[in-house]
Image: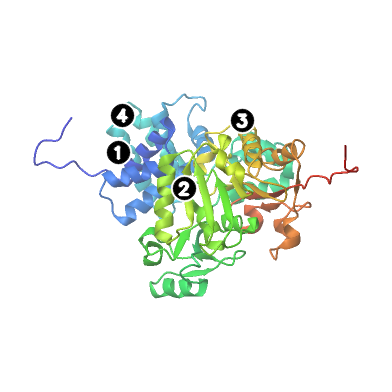
Amino acid sequence: MKAKPGRQRRPEGARSLSWRVLLDWESGKASIEALRERAFANEKLSARDRALVTEMTQGVLRHRTLLDYRIDTLLDRPDTSLPHPVRALLRLGVYQIMFLHRIPSHAAVGETVNIAKGTRYSGLVPLINAVLRKASISSPAPLPAIKQNPVSHLSLAASMPQWLVERLIAQRGVSEAEQILQSLNRPAPLALRVNTLKTDRDGLLAELDDLGIKGRPGRICRHAVILETGTVPALLQPFRQGRCTVQDEGAQLISPLLGAKPGERVVDVCAAPGGKAGHLAQEMEDRGTVIAIDRHLGRLRMTKESLTRLGISSVRLVTADALTLPCFLTLTPFRVLLDAPCSGTGVLRRHPEGKWKKDPDRIEALAQLQFDLLQAASKTVSPGGRILYTTCSILREENENVVDRFLNSADFRVADLNASSDLPENLFTERGELRVWPHLHDCDGFYAALLIKNNPPPLTGGAGGG
């Protein structure tokens, strides 16, 4: 119903808006970040309320399994079937009680109940009120013992789907799987990459200090700055003027591994949103050509905006499917960066929603796509040419297994990245692939393998004659 002329709609509160954003995410395909930004554009919220909406929506998705476990133990009948919007509202209320200790419990209970009163679920207000009041005064029920049931314990403690817990235990063992899962469930630090075409790290740190923003050098990457003061980077002058961009320290490790030099031609397939393409151009001193390919025109427009802000002119954007690369790419030897679509299991601390819309069947499909992309990319390099295959997954199925399958079908070898690097040795596998782990390096999880096309064997035998 339209509001009467001259009468303004009452602004939506932070909790109600958070609930609506979470419901929209559950029922659609848009990212939680995109839905938040859309909601912020339609509501006049204070910076404090925007931060609260971000905290609550991220937090509910980060701890969803544990929140459901807590809710079920507080119901008079744990098998009670709740309407989905009611369960989502209870998650929001219980999250505030369990994790947002600066918010008084009575406020979390009262505000959540008030939201329910204004909906078609008002008949369930007594149940909602009872569950939240119990949550505010009682201790959480104990989790299954890790020794007796490690999968259930870790799935609940770290709010991870059981299939992912099972795979990590099989891959790394219970003890290290627990460390990995705990690290993936913590909020990620905000990292910037210095644009060395315009400044250096000391210069950026000094500029941030002048703005009252505390930062420190990254632990691993020479051009990384970690922000220790909460802020929105897009509002900072050095960001707007292109002296830095947002990129996790783990992601900053990738592009330099390709070894691209000024004046060379490089292909970045699956390039959008362009962070690694811009980094390649930066490593090449903006001299040469980076051909950035993506099949999504809208995402390439975002890439162009980012490159323009950074003052980078050597990147050529091409709309194409990486599985059927344009024929002109097969005529020249290239260094190729293949940042393959993946499960994103290495970036769950930054994108916790990624836990809930993937399953083992999806991982299998992704692994096939990654292999097909490697096969297509291999046609663009001549003997001695290089492909840097990388994902932000921590699963072997998308990393070593894909590379092994490719090596069994193509005349390539794995280069030992550790042998030519001054990075810490614990970033590399035994055969020299990059392996970044959140629990070891405080970065997003990444994998990279440098694949070199072998030279053909020399011709043998004498020359024929007639």
Question: Which residue in the structure is indicated by mark 2?
Answer: 317
User: Sequence order check: which comes first, mark 1 or mark 4?
Assistant: 1
Which residue sits at x=35%, y=31%? 126
Point out the tag, 3 or 1, that comes first from the N-terminus. 1
Per the image, label 1 sits on a secondary structure element best described as helix
Q: Which mark is residue 154?
A: none
Q: Residue furthest right?
A: 462
Element type where label 3 sits in the image: helix
Q: Amino acid at mark 1?
A: Asn
Upstream in sequence: badge 3 or badge 2: 2
| Rendering coords of residue 462 (x, y %) | 90, 43
Distance Cα–Cα, label 2 vs label 1: 50 Å
Instruction: For label 1, count other residues whose C-alpha is less than 10 Å away and answer few (under 14), some (14-19) or many (20+).
Output: some
Depth check, mark 2 against mark 4: the one in front is 2
The image quarter in which residue 132 lies: top left
- The mark that comes first in sequence, 2 or 4, is 4
Residue 207 screen position, x and y as percent? 42, 73
Please tell me which residue lies in front, 126 or 305.
305
Check disc 4 and report the residue beneath it. Answer: 122
Nearest to the observer: residue 252 or residue 406 = 406
Estimate how packed mark 4 is, as few (under 14), some (14 to 19) or many (20 or more) residues with alpha carbons within 10 Å. some
Residue 365 disc label? 3
Per the model, the C-alpha gap separating discs 3 and 2 is 27 Å
Q: Residue at x 73, y 45 (%)?
A: 172
Q: Which residue is mark 1?
A: 114
